Image (spheres, grey):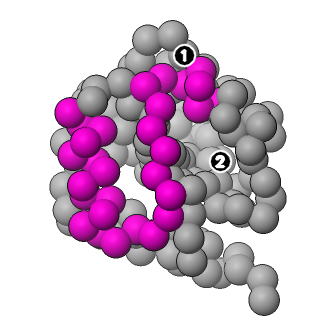
């Protein structure tokens, strides 16, 4: 099964490494990069479809539109049966984790740097979710 993989991250080096990791983990799908939440939410507002699956790797701390603002807007139209958000951050504050646990689209909270082992676990989570919800 293919997915749209959205990388919403302002650090170009981390984005490059994450792209390489995604390819190595063999996540199948089109990868689209955004340097902050604003162009990403604009893209999703236009392109979001109930018949597509979306994997979003989201940094919390970005200029223009941060991850929190992005999530607030995403939650107004995205559905849990075809959209999964993995939060990427270099700081794992307890308050952030508690707030994120309350958001139904957020699947996991991943502290940077992301490893091959973590990506393989993410791949399993994605496949489990979308294969269970797949209609034939």
Q: CA distance from mark 1 to mark 2?
A: 20 Å
Q: Position of residue 56 (x, y in %)?
A: 51, 47
Residue that appears at 43% across and 25% down: 35
Q: Position of residue 9 (x, y in %)?
A: 39, 31
The N terminus lies in quadrant: bottom right
Vertical placement of residue 38 versus 53, above or below: above
Q: Quadrant of residue 72?
A: top right
Q: How busy is the neighbourhood of tag 2: few (under 14 within 10 Å), some, or many (20 plus)?
A: few
Question: Does the segment drawn in magenta span residue 93?
Answer: no
Vertical placement of residue 51 versus 46, above or below: below
Residue that appears at 59% across and 32% down: 40
Q: Secondary structure at mark 1?
A: loop
Vertical placement of residue 26 versus 111, above or below: below
Q: Secondary structure at mark 2?
A: loop
Please say whether residue 50 is visible from this viewpoint.
Answer: yes
Please say whether residue 95 is visible from this viewpoint.
Answer: no
**Does residue 12 appear to the left or right of 2 in the view shown?**
left
Q: Position of residue 4 (x, y in %)?
A: 56, 56
The residue carrying mark 2 is 104
The C terminus lies in quadrant: bottom right
Residue that appears at 50% across and 64% down: 29
Q: How busy is the neighbourhood of tag 1: few (under 14 within 10 Å), some, or many (20 plus)?
A: some
The residue carrying mark 1 is 65
Report the label total: 2
Disc 1 and disc 2 in contact, CB within 8 angstroms: no
- Magenta region: 13-41
Front residue of this view, candidates 132 and 55: 55
Front residue of this view, candidates 40 and 134: 40
Q: Position of residue 41 (x, y in %)?
A: 65, 30
């Amino acid at each position: 099964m293919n997915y749209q993989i959205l990388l919403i991250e302002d650090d170009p080096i981390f984005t490059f490494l994450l792209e390489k990791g995604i390819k190595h983990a063999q996540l199948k799908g089109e990868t689209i990069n955004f340097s902050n939440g604003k162009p990403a939410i604009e893209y999703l507002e236009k392109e979001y479809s109930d018949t597509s699956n979306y994997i979003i790797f989201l940094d919390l701390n970005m200029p223009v539109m941060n991850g929190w603002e992005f999530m607030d807007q995403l939650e107004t139209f995205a559905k849990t049966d075809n959209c999964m958000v993995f939060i990427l951050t270099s700081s794992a504050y307890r308050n952030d984790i508690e707030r994120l646990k309350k958001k139904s689209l957020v699947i996991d909270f991943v502290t940077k740097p992301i490893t091959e082992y973590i990506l393989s676990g993410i791949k399993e989570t994605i496949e489990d979710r979308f294969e269970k919800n797949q209609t034939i």
